[in-house]
Image: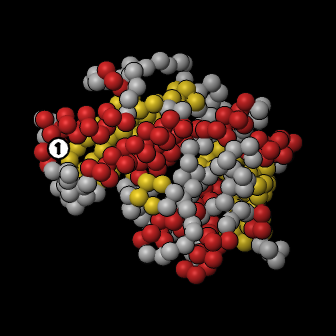
Amino acid sequence: MKITLSHGSGGQATSDLIDNIFAKHFTNPVLNLMEDSAVVDGNEKIAITTDSFVVTPLFFKGGDIGRLAVCGTVNDLLMRGAKAKYITCGFIIEEGTDTDDLEKIVESMAKTAEEAGVIIVAGDTKVIEGNGGIYINTTGIGFVKDNSISAYNIKDGDCVIVSGTIGDHHATILSARMGIENEIYSDNAPLNEMVYALQNGGIDIHCMRDITRGGLGTVLNELSLASGVQIEIEEEKIPITDEVRAFSKILGLNIMHMGNEGKMVLFVSEDQSKKALEILKSSKYALNCAIIGKVKNGEGVIQITRLGGRKKVGVLVGEGLPRIC
């Protein structure tokens, strides 16, 4: 069955769409009430984030727009040290969308939400003219016990840790669009397991940031500017798969500006860095984590090359790869 404008009319077709696809997979005591708004438990401090997902193609090696939407939203909450609890999802569906594809995406969202430890408590669907596209907007809510995790808490002497290989998602999406066959898979994943393990392990996390659009280079520049410090990284210590490295060289891509959807960079004191690394490696999504540099007095991001030279790393200039997430 194909989506038609009648599925967005609010009538029987809309009800059928919700009952046969969304309610089938998004089921929990809060959402099952089907009220106009969800009432959930809270505490003194909450973290809130919102995001929209327009990735093309909708399905790619290692994931799809549904998994991506949950991961991206949950990870933004986690980066402030929040316990991610609830998300909402709004679907904008173009005419011509195959309901089989829609159900695969909805099912993927449900499974990823379960993995991430969140429940989907509210949603909406709209149908517009088009040719089979799907766009998802999400809002995430989490609870915060300690809101000290921030770019402003990065300190001179901190170690810089990345949770795994960089550039994977970027290379996957670009490969799909160009019809290039390879063994590169998106890293889109929820980071809750590793973040909670760090917190439960007593690691004093100064700052965390997920590495998404703009890549590691852009993220580090944003953090350097916010914290007023220099971030020095070593090129040879940055984890990259051989496949992504070769792919980036063939196409002339700067690996420092290639995006991910399941990796983070974090800053901890040097005396806790090895323990943090050991904890991260207990997560299936952080097997290739590494300490890649240190924080120093100064400004900007400096990369120590394999030959021992020093070069400044800038932010991504221009459009980069559109519709990556």
Q: Which quadrant of the structure image shows residue 19?
A: top left
12 sits left or right of 313 in the view: left
User: Circle 1 sits on which residue?
Assistant: 7
199 sits left or right of 217 in the view: right
- Rendered location of residue 214, percent (x, y): 54, 61
Q: Is residue 44 visible?
A: yes
- Rendered location of residue 138, percent (x, y): 40, 41
Q: Residue at x 74, y 43 (%)?
A: 282
Q: Residue at x 25, y 58 (%)?
A: 132
For the C terminus, the image quarter is bottom left
Looking at the picture, tell me which residue is in the foreground, 102 or 325. 102
The amino acid type, in three-letter code, at marker 1 is His
How are the colours assigned in the image? secondary structure
How busy is the neighbourhood of tag 1: few (under 14 within 10 Å), some, or many (20 plus)?
many
Looking at the picture, tell me which residue is in the foreground, 31 or 304. 31
**Image vertical order of residue 132 relative to residue 210, above or below:** below
Q: Is residue 214 visible?
A: no
Q: Judging from the image, what secondary structure is the residue with disc 1 in?
A: helix
Looking at the picture, tell me which residue is in the foreground, 49 or 177. 177
